[in-house]
Image (cartoon, grey):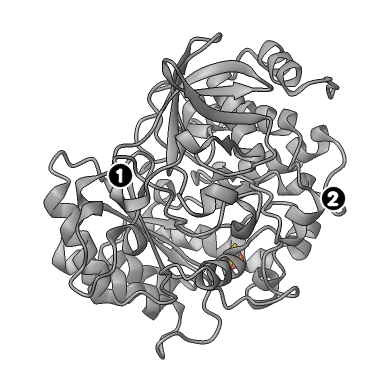
Amino acid sequence: MSTTAETRSALVEDLIGRFPEVPPEAVLKEDLLRTGIAFDESALTDNLDGEVKPKSYFIFSFDQKPLAELGAAAVRRPPEEIALTGGPWGLRRTIVSVRVNPESPYSVSGSADGLVLSLEGRLLADVALPPMPEYYRHLLDNGKTVMETAPTIQWGYLIYLTVLRLCQYFGAHEECKFCDINHNWRQHRKAGRPYTGVKPVEDVLEALALIDQYDTERVSTAYTLTGGSVTSSVDGLAEADFYGRYAEAIESRFPGRWIGKVVAQALPKADVQRFKDYGISIYHPNYEVWDKRLFEIISPGKERYVGREEWHRRIFDAADVFGASHVIPNFVAGVEMAKPFGFESVDSAIESTTEGLDHFMSRGITPRFTTWCPEPTTPLGRDNPNGAPLEYHVRLLGAYREALDRHGLSAPPGYGPAGPGNAVFSVSSFMDTLTP
Ligand code: SF4
């Protein structure tokens, strides 16, 4: 069943009513993530000079317009995340990653009582912004910022180390069709922003030392080592050696200080074992989309260099190394409905995605998902500026929880607390939907 609603408010309220097992916080968060938010100037930051933590552009742009079309938000950055509470639905604290869209029906603006989130002019929630962390106020010896070198997201829980800002899957026949990593690198360079292609190991260690020193409440709990795929070499190193050198250096210098995670291609078992030996505890060999036909179209580089069946086989191999619960492949929720290739009905998209969940969960592996942001410079974003139907996202949350129950699994490790009002994972509401 699908719904037609005349306004966005009616659509959101209809889905909240029809799917009472999904918290209203999660329904709203999914819509914000797929639609983006227009920011009033009063809700923008003073970049690194103010009291609010700015958006770091930690890997992709996650904006629904190019930087050059963001107006004031291109000069004064928006906040990294927002926290929503209250409003007509009495929202429990809900942390949402910021995706900017000047044309969004959602806006964050100032009021007499502080910042508020509105939809089509109707007030929906009070908005709190993330405070500037002390470690962002300190520079590396070479003048680089911690925000660019080792930004934190998820309200400070996760240090996001995109050590390679480019992907060697290049061009229309290799890049994943939802991904703007290479475009994002180009647009930041063009705007004259510091945006390091390959982060020196020493810079990463120095930034982590600042976080370790000034994060006195020890909010930062995990780090993710990630970046583009390496099909030849970077600094003369193949992918496992390239990402492995950071893991080795971090765990030698700060043994066990944070939960170490690596997002990389599905690599042969011996390479995966090296990540584990360096001290990494969680491995994310992201499969992006389950359906065979769609995988070949949407992730042509992954199909070409590894192949879908081999990718999946290596996910299972990695479970022998890390333990099944610590292999957490991501998929991008929504791209399976992107025109012109995707499923045409929500039913068939959910059925396919659930088949993938069962495939992995039946072996103890818990995938997780991020909510597709239709960035305009990607093929799928260009053709689908409104993203996937909200009903798909809402039903996926229910299907995911049911799949976990069916296989006797619980929330994957390394994402902080679960449950509405508790979750900090900001780029999908799957953690907001699970039972604490
Ligand atoms: S592998 Fe795909 S999703 Fe990952 S960075 Fe490369 S193009 Fe983007």
In the shown orientation, is residue 331 left or right of residue 345?
left
Q: Which mark is residue 323?
A: none
Left/right of residue 205 with respect to residue 176 in the rendered view: left
Taking the image in four quarters, ligand 1 sits in the one at bottom right
Quarter of the rendering occupied by the C terminus: top left
- Tell me, yes or no, if residue 411 can be seen here: no
Amino acid under disc 1: Gly
Percent across and percent down for residue 157 are 31, 42
Position of the N terminus by quadrant: top right
- Occupied quadrant, residue 93: top left
Q: Which residue is mark 1?
A: 50
Q: Mark 1 to mark 2: distance in Å? A: 41 Å
**Residue 424, quarter of the rendered image:** top left
Q: Position of residue 169 (x, y in %)?
A: 62, 75
Label 2: how many Cα within 10 Å (few below 14, some 14–19, many 20+): some
Q: Earlier in the sequence, mark 1 or mark 2?
A: 1
Task: Name which residue type carries label 2.
Answer: Lys
Of residues 336 and 156, which is closer to you in this image?
156
Q: Residues within 10 Å of mark 1 (few under 14, many from 20)?
A: few
Element type where label 1 sits in the image: loop
Q: Residue at x 74, y 28 (%)?
A: 391
For the point 31% across and 60% down, which residue is it?
Answer: 280
Disc tally is 2
Q: Position of residue 388 (x, y in %)?
A: 75, 40
Q: Position of residue 210 (x, y in %)?
A: 17, 58
Ligand 1 contact, mark 2 (Cβ < 8 Å): no
User: Which residue has dot 2 on it?
Assistant: 339
Residue depth check, mark 1 versus mark 2: number of the one nearer the observer: 1
Q: Is mark 1 within 8 Å of ligand 1?
A: no
Q: Secondary structure at mark 2?
A: loop
Q: Answer yes or no: do the residues labelled 1 and 2 have beta carbons within 8 Å? A: no
Location of residue 72 with respect to 315 vertically, above or below: above
